[in-house]
Image: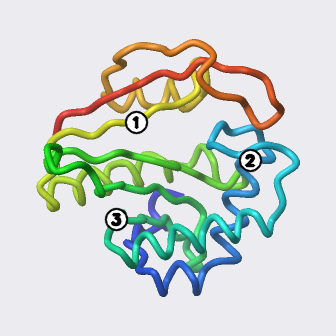
Amino acid sequence: MTSSTTIQIFTREAILTHLPQLADILHSCVLGGASVSFMLPYSYEQACDFWRGVADSVGREERTVLVCLDAEGQPVGTVQLITDQPDNQPHRADVAKLLVHQNARRCGAAGRLMQALETVAREQGKSVLVLDTATGSGAETFYLRAGWQKVGEIPRYALMPDGEMTATSVFYKFL
């Protein structure tokens, strides 16, 4: 996948145009057990509603959405850079919702998305990125391998989609 994918920044309009594919990615991840803030049962319509809200946030310039497109130009993964921060943190951004469709995993999409996100963050004057993920998850291993620094863990921080309580690991990366 790496050689035949491209990464694009999606505008509000592009998100709405690709709403079915983006909702499918999120729906796939939640049904697959990813801890990305949603609980089972999780409907496709809920995923559409989420992306409509993200599109509005992009329109207000609160975040940047990067999308990995396959060789046919179809979205297979996404990540968000949340730049709407308090006045005393203009140098910082949050990373959220690194999502890769279950059918497109282990082909480099997540790595390419994160590399592109770091480039965009630098271009926007950001020098510190922060994220959190479920402790013990594949995502935690991915971030460690990608050079992120683990700050620590917060026990019983969130629920997995099936309702099981999980700890959350907090990470940062200097650019």
Q: Earlier in the sequence, mark 1 or mark 2?
A: 2
Q: Quadrant of residue 88?
A: top left
Earlier residue among tags 3 and 2? 2
Give the side of residue 11 with respect to residue 32, left or right: left
Task: Determine crowd level at label 1: few under 14, some 14-19, many 20+ residues with C-alpha closer than 10 A.
Answer: some
Give the numbered dot on residue 131: 1
Q: Distance from label 1 to label 2 (Cα)?
A: 18 Å
Residue occupying image coordinates x 35% and y 45%: 94
State the separation of the CA atoms marked 3 and 2: 24 Å
Tell me if label 3 and label 2 are in contact, CB under 8 Å.
Answer: no
Marked residue nearer the N-terminal end (3 or 1): 3
The residue identified by callout 3 is 62
Label 3 vs label 2, nearer the camera: 3
**Residue 123 at x, y = what percent?**
15, 61
Q: CA distance from mark 3 to mark 1?
A: 16 Å
Residue type at numbered disc 3: Glu
